[in-house]
Image (cartoon, rainbow, N blue to C red):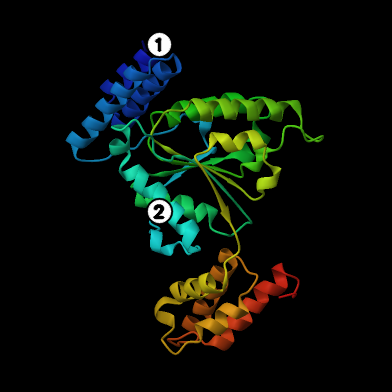
Amino acid sequence: MATGKQIKALIRSHYGDSREEFTTLVLQVAAHEARRGHTALAQEIRELVDDAKANAGASVVVQFPNELSGLVLSEKPDVPSTALILDKELHARVERIIVEFRQRNKLKRHGLSHRRKILLSGAPGTGKTLTARVLAHELGQPLRIVQMDRLVTKFMGETSAKLRLIFDHLRVVPGVYLFDEFDAIGGERSLDNDVGEMRRVLTSFLQFIENDVSDNLIVAATNNLRLLDRALFRRFDDVLQYNLPGQEERRRLISNLLGTFHDKRFPLVKAAEAASGLSHAEIDRACRDAIKETVLSDKNRVTIKSLVRLIKERQNAYLGGEA
């Protein structure tokens, strides 16, 4: 049953006509029951909330508690899957996650579960966060970004407790949960520079993610897979490796980004060759800079000369001019 404190808060929010606060408190009660092992009751409470939202004909904003203020950021991405330029194999694996989520009830009827614990690894700017935004958009879910680096640095000694609170809400608050900068806690436990606090936090995270039975997607992103504890891998349904874009991916990416600011005569192959060694994010910035120059010059089309110059600027800054 709900605690006395929760009951009083529910009554105050009800008579105070605060629908959002009431919904948040109800979901906190569900989380409390789930923590006590009453998973069926927790699920029933969540279904009652979902039914009420459907009958009201409008979505209800769910607020995270003050203890998680600044640690969990929520957004509603509008990034379609067509914006994600990856090699065919990786793109197919992302699409598989979307298909399984959309048909999760069909899988459940056969005793199967959908892929929902995903580890993304790759250099900065290669599309990991963008993938999380695409997943949230395609599945019609809000994106909840858990800032792991801030969680560790700001709450040293309390990190495990904060993680427990996050997972309590993850059970009942819908969304795609992105644990960003996952390296902050996911380091190999045997490393000499590891500290006891981080070992405890990682152990807690492994337990939380293994015991979670919600339908929500959990996405962890890391810049270096080799730094992660090997025990993490078996907790995830999929481990996706992101690399710098190849020639074909660079061509498609530049074409997408330039949009109406280029035509069929634009030498996309030459532009893609010039962008060799750059990440998706750096190519994005170079293309946007080229479009801004074009607009400010009162022109309608980006020239290959200006784009290559801006690409070279990026390469000189990030590659030391080696490209």
* x 27%, y 40%: residue: 59
User: Is disc 2 surrounded by few (<14), some (14 to 19) or many (20+) residues within 10 Å?
Assistant: some
Q: Is residue 72 visible?
A: yes
Residue 147 drawn at (x, y percent): 57, 41
The amino acid type found where label 2 is placed reads: Glu
Kindly state the secondary structure of the residue where label 2 is placed: helix
> Which of marks 1 and 2 precedes in the sequence?
1
Kindly state the secondary structure of the residue where label 1 is placed: loop
**Mark 2–mark 1 contact, CB under 8 Å?**
no
Label disc, if present, on residue 66 of the rendered structure: none
- The residue closer to the viewer here, 216 or 19, is 216
| Image vertical order of residue 238 relative to residue 203, above or below | below
* x 60%, y 79%: residue: 273
**Which residue reaches farthest front?**
110
User: Is disc 1 surrounded by few (<14), some (14 to 19) or many (20+) residues within 10 Å?
Assistant: few
User: Which image quarter holds the C terminus?
Assistant: bottom right
> Viewed as shown, does residue 191 lie left or right of 252?
right
Measure the C-alpha gap from mark 2 to mark 1. Answer: 42 Å
- The residue closer to the viewer here, 259 or 72, is 259
Residue 305 drawn at (x, y percent): 58, 88
Residue 122 drawn at (x, y percent): 61, 54
* Quadrant in the rendering for residue 4: top left
| Image vertical order of residue 13 relative to residue 148, above or below | above
The amino acid type found where label 1 is placed reads: Thr
Q: Is residue 17 visible?
A: no
* x 57%, y 69%: residue: 246
User: Which image quarter holds the N terminus?
Assistant: top left
Residue 317 drawn at (x, y percent): 71, 70
Mark 1 lies on residue: 3
Mark 2 or mark 1, whichever is nearer to me: 2
Mark 2 lies on residue: 95
